Amino acid sequence: MMSSKEKKPQPYVNESWFIGLMREVSMSSKAAVGAKMGIKRTVISQVCNGCGPYGDGRSSVKRIEQAYRRTYEQIICCHTKQVVNVEHCREMALCKAPTHNPLRMIQWQECQRCEFKPMAETDGKAKKGFSEDKPMQQAGIIDKVTLPLPEVGAPQVMEFL
């Protein structure tokens, strides 16, 4: 029987990202790993030790996992089949469509479908010219009332019976 002081093992301790996180912590420190990942040292400590809101299941470790993968993992690009870091993915997937270059366009399209595509960083501001409270104006309206043009060479006046 477990006493209230004993910690039960967390489900994430056998996952590859957690094993990698523990390896990085053992090679440096929780503070250094947390600073590199952009997460407070106390949060890293709670996740590593399985205590606090992460230990009792009140908080999800998904954000910690994503930060670890973004910081420490390398990805095999689905288009080039080369090992790349997340910054390369961010540059390729989140840029505007390169319509001027057919080869880059093919890679950009692959990046849009990739399972590792990073999410765009938002700073809380709406994009310039767009507002969430007003709808976007339509680019063009199809006119269903206009009569067809007369045939070439035919009289330009149409008679209605």
Image (cartoon, rainbow, N blue to C red):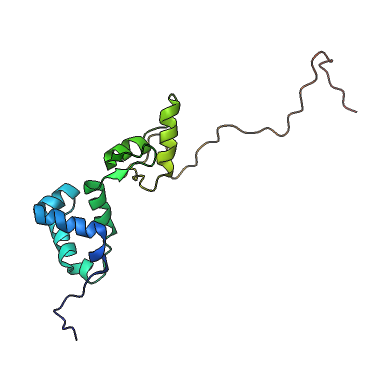
At 43% from the left edge and 39% from the top edge, which residue is drawn? Answer: 110
- Above or below, 30 against 70 in this view is below
Task: Residue 114: give x, y in percent of width and height.
Answer: 40, 45
- The residue nearer to you, when weighing 4 against 74, is 74
The furthest residue to the left: 28
At 83% from the left edge and 18% from the top edge, which residue is drawn? Answer: 157
At 36% from the left edge and 34% from the top edge, which residue is drawn? Answer: 95
- The residue nearer to you, when weighing 47 against 25, is 25
- The residue nearer to you, when weighing 40 against 115, is 115
Quadrant occupied by the N terminus: bottom left
Task: Residue 152: give x, y in percent of width and height.
Answer: 79, 15
State whether residue 131 appears in this view: no
Q: Residue 41: which quarter of the image? A: bottom left
Q: Does 115 sit left or right of 47 as displayed? A: right
Task: Residue 20: give x, y in percent of width and height.
Answer: 20, 55
- Above or below, 100 against 77 in this view is above
Q: Does 24 sit left or right of 141 as displayed? A: left
Task: Residue 52: give x, y in percent of width and height.
Answer: 18, 68
The furthest residue to the top: 153
At 87% from the left edge and 23% from the top edge, which residue is drawn? Answer: 159
Quadrant occupied by the C terminus: top right
The furthest residue to the bottom: 1
